[in-house]
Image: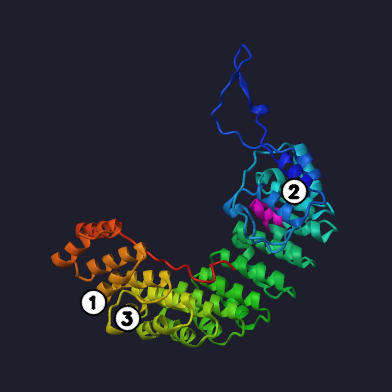
Amino acid sequence: MLRIIGSLAAAMLVSTAGAAKHDHAGNAIKDNTHASPQFDVSALLTAARGAPPAICSLASRAVDDGNWRRGGDAPVTPLGPSRDREWSIGTRALPAADIARLMDGLASEDQCVREISVRLIGTQDDSAVTPQLVKRLASNDASVRAVAAFGLGLVHAKTAVSQLIHSLRDASSGAAANSAWALGRIDDGRARGPLVSALGDTSSLAREAAVVALGRLDSVSSATAIVRTLQHDDVASVRRAAAWALGKLDAKDGALALATALTNDSDAKVREMSAWALGELDETSGSTALQRALQKDSDEDVRESAAWALGHTGDESATDVLAAAAESDQSVSVRGTAAWALGHAGRSDNRAVAALSHLLRDSNDDTRLRAAWALGQLGDSTALAAIDSALGREQNPEIRRALIRAISKSGGNTAARMRVLIDSKDPQVREAAVRSLAGGRAFGPWPWPWPRPRPWP
């Protein structure tokens, strides 16, 4: 195992010898320009052969080119899909001989060799690799066709759109799914019709990839087909992707279907994504379904996303339901998000103030922080007694600052009250009091809850 790790690491070391500069006397000159990493491709592929998947995954991260180019969400990769690729060392343009070696590596029986080969290919300019990848879309080997489509997506091969559209009908589900994924990344309108047709594929993997691609094409003209998929597909992961796509496209015509899925779908992840999508639509038409989900859904992630969505849409009629969830839901995450939603809506009434005041005694620090922030957003003077009481017992410095902020925003920054705070032995309390009196805006906190599920299909 150590030998494999060492071999892979050595093969991927940056070589700067070739980039050294010298003066006329032969002395080395310090070069402060950024030197791109250089790979010994042949050594790398040799070292990769037989490497365990976990080790190969670590090595393949180092050839990803960061962010959108990583391709961790591809339906089919030699090592299997991964979404945790977070760093890279990048590459410069590789010589033709190395690209040829990598292209040969796509057909290797060793999955690690295929993985590293396609990811290195994915760091190259599309014009240097697209023709050869397109050629491999016609391979007799289904795994080669799948990895070729993956590579075309990595390089955003706009000149390969027609070939990828043709590959949507590939008999191999992996090749068809990766072709759909690639078309979603390339974002060419010619793919919309063929991708809609791919929603009828017998492979759920291909259908899911097609609906995600449609969500990325940024055209609401696909909404009717996506709604149909949400309503009728028999695979939960496909329905979940359809809900995501409707939210991503801001397809307001899909609100009814999303509300129905939130209420009736048997799969919690579909309901969760439907709640998120309704929040993204920013329409009150789904409020009834969201309130029902917050009150009755058995899954806490669904309830949390429903609370977030209600706060995001700002529906005034949801205040009582959000307040009840903030006070009594068994889930810490639901209580905290309900508190945030009440503050984000910013509409003060007795029910919201009572619920948030109650939460100032919650056992969870984050929930108390969100409640304090929310009371500051409401700015209701009737909450001052509860805020004062909480400040007297609160030990968390961040929450104390949030409580002082709430006092200020609720009209409680009287001379007597602020004198007590400024004379506090706690320097953080003194600082927060001074900020309050000075009207400083960089006060915090801003407890922004990122809803489950993350907006990723």
- Residue marked by disc 2: 117
Residue nearest the observer in this picture, 248 or 9: 9
* Marks 3, 2: nearer the viewer: 3
Residue 414 position within the rendered picture, expressed as x and y whole percent measured from the top left: 15, 67
- Residue marked by disc 3: 352
Give the residue displayed 60% in from the left and 72% down from the top: 241
Report if residue 14 lies within the magenta region: no
Left or right position of 231 against 137: left
Label 1 – label 2 distance at C-alpha: 65 Å
Magenta extent: 150-161
Helix, strand or loop status at disc 1: helix
* Marks 1, 2: nearer the viewer: 1
Amino acid type of disc 1?
Ala
Prevailing secondary structure class for the magenta stretch in the rendered image? helix
Relative to 456, residue 261 above or below: below
- Residue at far left of view: 415
